[in-house]
Image (cartoon, rainbow, N blue to C red):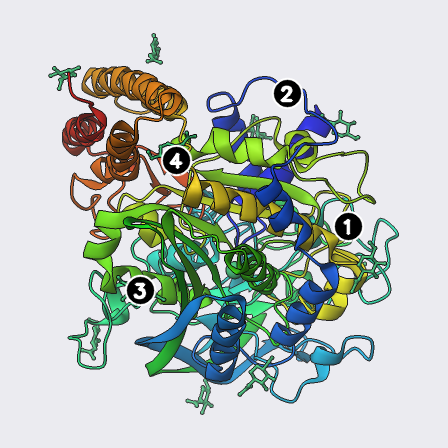
Amino acid sequence: MLRILSSLVLLGALAYACQRDWDALHRRMHQHRAHNRHAKRAEVEYPPTLTETESILVNSFDNKSISDWSYYYTHGDHLGSHNKTMAEWTAQKWRDAGFDAWLEEFPIWVTYPEHSSLTLYRPDGTTHEANLVEEVLSEDDTSSYPNVIPAFHAMSASGNVTAEYVYVGRGTRADFQVLKDAGIELEGKIAMANYGAIYRGTKVKNAQDNGMAGCIIFTDPLDDGEVTEENGYDAYPDGPARNPSSIQRGSVRFSSLYSGDPTTVGWASSWDSPRGNVSVYNPSIPSIPLSMKDALPLLSALEGNGVSAKEANRSGWTGAFSNMTYDSGPTSGAVVHMNHLMKGWIAPVWDVIGVINGTSPDEVVVVGNHRDAWVIGGAADPNSGSAILIELAGAFGKLLQKGWKPKRTIVLGSWDAEEFGLQGSTEWVESHLPWLTSTAVAYLNIDIGVSGPRTAFSGSGEIQTFVIEQMKKILFPEGWGDFPTLYDMWYNVTEGEVSPLGSGSDYASFYQNGIGCIDIGSDGGETDPIYHYHSNYDSYNWMSKFGDPGFRLHAAMGQFLSLILYHIADDPLIPWDMPHAASVLESYLSELNDTVAESDFPDLDLTPLASAISNFTAQAEHVAQVAEQALAFNDTVMLGVVNSKYRDFSRGFASAGGLPGRETFRNVISAPGIDNGYGADVFPAVTDSINAGNEGPAGEWVEKSARAVLRAAEILKVGS
Ligand SMILES: *[C@@H]1O[C@H](CO)[C@@H](O)[C@H](O)[C@H]1NC(C)=O
Ligand SMILES: *[C@@H]1O[C@H](CO)[C@@H](O)[C@H](O)[C@H]1NC(C)=O
Ligand SMILES: *[C@@H]1O[C@H](CO)[C@@H](O)[C@H](O)[C@H]1NC(C)=O
Ligand SMILES: *[C@@H]1O[C@H](CO)[C@@H](O)[C@H](O)[C@H]1NC(C)=O
Ligand SMILES: *[C@@H]1O[C@H](CO)[C@@H](O)[C@H](O)[C@H]1NC(C)=O
Ligand SMILES: *[C@@H]1O[C@H](CO)[C@@H](O)[C@H](O)[C@H]1NC(C)=O
Ligand SMILES: *[C@@H]1O[C@H](CO)[C@@H](O)[C@H](O)[C@H]1NC(C)=O
Ligand SMILES: *[C@@H]1O[C@H](CO)[C@@H](O)[C@H](O)[C@H]1NC(C)=O
Ligand SMILES: *[C@@H]1O[C@H](CO)[C@@H](O)[C@H](O)[C@H]1NC(C)=O
Ligand SMILES: *[C@@H]1O[C@H](CO)[C@@H](O)[C@H](O)[C@H]1NC(C)=O
Ligand SMILES: *[C@@H]1O[C@H](CO)[C@@H](O)[C@H](O)[C@H]1NC(C)=O
Ligand SMILES: [Zn+2]
């Protein structure tokens, strides 16, 4: 059982690319696994047989050049809006490969700390000044750059607060409730939460909603599983355990409410755009991230006071420092002074767009990765993906040199400012929406391409089967166990499970406008080297010594993405599995059914949705038969008809208007959980309404979601 649980944890870590939140993933994987599962482990032909074109693509990947691209990306400040040169360099690399490439500029709201300090005053009069910076390591060249990015929370508010503080566990709503039930006064105090389980911005929001004056979020070794110093592993740079000074940066925007520039939610940002007030979308209290080293004195000063960890009895409350009790406090006279001054202004960011025109220009496949990183390095997040995209452009360049032209137009996107809140991709989608809506066949995302060896992906139902088939064609590099192909590793990690899409990375705006998406990547598991997420140690040195020595995982992920892109762009029939898409909807319905059964409204009638899904299933099966025949008889007219249906049907899922309270989230099939922020809820408008205690709207959204599914079914319908 333990084994299975830990492998599920591995899977989840990727599914929500920009995080590593074991607890939530645990739960979520459990939830989804019963439902959407590619049941049996398939036999894999070994060695795989590739077509000539597939071989050209796959053989084009060179670990040496990937390492060079990685080195370039990880040796200069490239926080969102900071590095136009890097955007131009990327465009030039794509041009060298044969793509048309240019920059698109968007002015967005950015934030940066002007001053940050945090001091603990103990009851005995002694003080401790938190470091708020990571140690310089002689082994890791970029840790000593003079322009290292400070550890801060993007979109945080300013504040100068002196107050008692309370440990709140993971900082979920239920955690705060435990404290309130125990009579602990929260108002005006500072919350101290550990990272994990839910999105960091939700922790800040929960603190704010409880009247608290500030929020500290720290890293606890609890999130590091087996690989901790207490378990005898050396810390980075000497070994695979976490360096105790590492700090997780990150945005604290209210991510389940919007994506993109918070001053232009719902429209594209340009220099003369009208702009709204950011205050509804971002916290009003200051927050600061802390290393585990800096957290210890604060935790220690709470010992023996408030609610004990045992009384709290909450998941993730007791951390992994065996010498800490994790009592809530407050401790009378133990006070934190937090002085945090943030600046905000409008600054330009630069997306890079690269294009190969197809022979059918009304069908377009978009592949994207963000380029901006939280730190000078960013070797995993996101530049493992960026290095892979350059090598992928080169692989397609080899085909172009042979006179090849894809059937469908290929668009590469190198997005800026993902880390502040998916700004680069969202503004691009918003500024090209009519064109994307009429032409986009799919969006393929790679964010953290490699932060460990465990492969996983999440995505739309129709694309899954085909993506799994491509994994069987990729040899898995030696050194991470006995996994001959990528498929073998993937199956080992996921047992065939594919999770739905939330909003952890740049696919969000595409998906929320009804474009089918997948998100691929690989992460570390319980016994792999600790990936220092959003920390200075997500560096080239870490990657080349611990994450992917030899850059062969990078090559494998790139080969995988190339085959996916090649087939979607060039196959006579877009390779969707529509009956599988239908069965994924069935599985989400059964998940919703479970949610309803456990809710306050167990009698909520789901029949409209069930019947819409059966209608969709019938159309899916029918169109699949038509497609098979069209292919068998090379009936190009019918293939064209089916392809346009495969391209368009998922727009139906986004046809019911904005989800309650979040206008720019429109996909009725899945969206980030309101209270979780990263992970996805299925049939989110219904789930949200149930969770908010609104039975009327829940019923209305069953109807509206059903109509959206019927709209998709109607688009799929072929003649009579
Ligand atoms: C931009 O990134 C490149 C490559 O990492 C680096 O050489 C350059 O110094 C960076 N530019 C700035 C302004 O930091
Ligand atoms: C912050 O608050 C402290 C006392 O609470 C005060 O001494 C200090 O001047 C304030 N700093 C700023 C920049 O307002
Ligand atoms: C934005 O809204 C907040 C809260 O309502 C208000 O205090 C602030 O002045 C507004 N800012 C602008 C620029 O309108
Ligand atoms: C702790 O919580 C679990 C589940 O939430 C419950 O089953 C258990 O009885 C609780 N233990 C105590 C001591 O309250
Ligand atoms: C608790 O353990 C950590 C790590 O093992 C150590 O760094 C710290 O000094 C200890 N703290 C106390 C108060 O003993
Ligand atoms: C690609 O197609 C677009 C739109 O039709 C056109 O403007 C552009 O010039 C074409 N690019 C190339 C390199 O042919
Ligand atoms: C995954 O691999 C481990 C180690 O090789 C093995 O013990 C386990 O059974 C595998 N799990 C699956 C689901 O194949
Ligand atoms: C590329 O992989 C080979 C082994 O296949 C290895 O010897 C070499 O060091 C790797 N190159 C880089 C730059 O890591
Ligand atoms: C929904 O759950 C109920 C029990 O709560 C069960 O009887 C019914 O079969 C389920 N329906 C679906 C479609 O899963
Ligand atoms: C379901 O699909 C059929 C066509 O196969 C259509 O005639 C019928 O109206 C659809 N049902 C609903 C409720 O739209
Ligand atoms: C299918 O038909 C098209 C156009 O008629 C032709 O170019 C193509 O070679 C045919 N494909 C096969 C596999 O026969
Ligand atoms: Zn990322």
Residue 316 visible: no
Q: Is mark 4 within 8 Å of ligand 11?
A: yes
Q: Which mark is residue 23?
A: none
Discs 3, 1 touching: Cβ within 8 Å = no
Q: Which residue is mark 4?
A: 572
Task: Tell me the crowding category of disc 4: few under 14, some 14 to 19, or many 20 or more residues within 10 angstroms, Cα based.
Answer: some
Q: Which residue is mark 2?
A: 41
Give the residue displayed 73% in from the left and 42% down from the top: 526
Q: Is mark 1 within 8 Å of ligand 5?
A: yes
Image quarter where the C terminus lies is top left
Q: Quadrant of residue 692?
A: top left
Residue 17 percent across, percent down from the top left? 53, 51
Give the residue displayed 47% in from the left and 43% down from the top: 178
Callout 3, which amino acid? Trp
Q: Which residue is mark 1?
A: 322
Q: Is mark 2 within 8 Å of ligand 7?
A: yes
Up-down relation of residue 446 to residue 589 (above or below):
below
Give the residue displayed 21% in from the left and 15% down from the top: 611
User: Is 433 on the left-hand or right-hand side of 540?
Assistant: left
Callout 4, which amino acid? Pro
- Disc 3 is placed on an element classified as helix
